Image: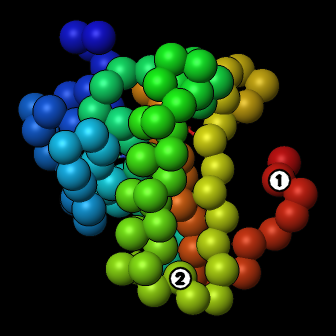
Amino acid sequence: MNDCLFCKIASGQIPADIVAENEIAVAFRDISPEAPSHVLVIPREHHDNVADLALANPLLAGQLLALAAEVIQTEKLTNGYRIVTNTGVDGGQSVNHLHFHVLGGRGLTWPPG
Ligand code: 5GP
Ligand code: ZN
């Protein structure tokens, strides 16, 4: 996936404000935050979306949530948070490398648009 923006962030080719990382995943601040705390959690390995990831590598899906849990702690989202993964055209996905949005730091409305 030579042309994938998030592959380039994961490999360090494009800089990002990294808040947590390990050998399989990276968490970095969204460039256009929608909440006081808005972090994206991505696998280093390219998968288009969460269903593809869960079928190809369910262990990695769990490991990503574990990194999200670290972010929730370090961002001190003790009052709550939301984890979202927009998928496909109807889901409003704009970067086709699976990412979990971790949003918090304010009351979040429901339902989404
Ligand atoms: P999606 O629209 O696919 O659910 O989410 C993609 C997210 O990536 C958006 O919230 C957007 O602000 C963020 N984003 C796009 N380009 C960059 C970038 O170059 N750096 C960072 N840190 N975030 C980005
Ligand atoms: Zn990618």
Between 106 and 49, the one lying in front of the other is 49
Q: CA distance from mark 2 to mark 1?
A: 20 Å
Residue 12 relative to residue 83: left or right: left
What's the mark number on residue 24?
Answer: none
Q: Which residue is depicted at the point 44% across and 58% down?
A: 66
Name the residue rendered at 47%, 25% in the picture. 57
Quadrant where the N terminus is found in the figure = top left
For the residue carrying disc 1, how many other residues have a C-alpha within 10 Å: few (<14), some (14-19), or many (20+)?
few
Callout 2, which amino acid?
Leu
Residue at point 74%, 72% (across, down): 108
- Front-most of residues 4 and 72: 72
Q: Is 86 drawn above or below residue 35 in the view shown? A: above
Residue on which the image places disc 2: 77
Q: Is residue 5 visible?
A: no
Circle 1 residue:
112
Q: Give how far across and how far down residue 25 sits, in percent.
A: 30, 44
- Residue, far left: 13
- Residue extending farthest front: 59
Image side of residue 55 versus residue 65, left or right: right
User: Relative to residue 47, is residue 49 drawn left or right?
Assistant: right
Of the numbered discs 2 and 1, the one sitting upstream in the chain is 2
Disc 2 residue crowd, few under 14, some 14–19, many 20+, Cα 10 Å: some
SS for tag 2? loop
Residue 44, given in percent of the width and then of the height, sits at 28, 33
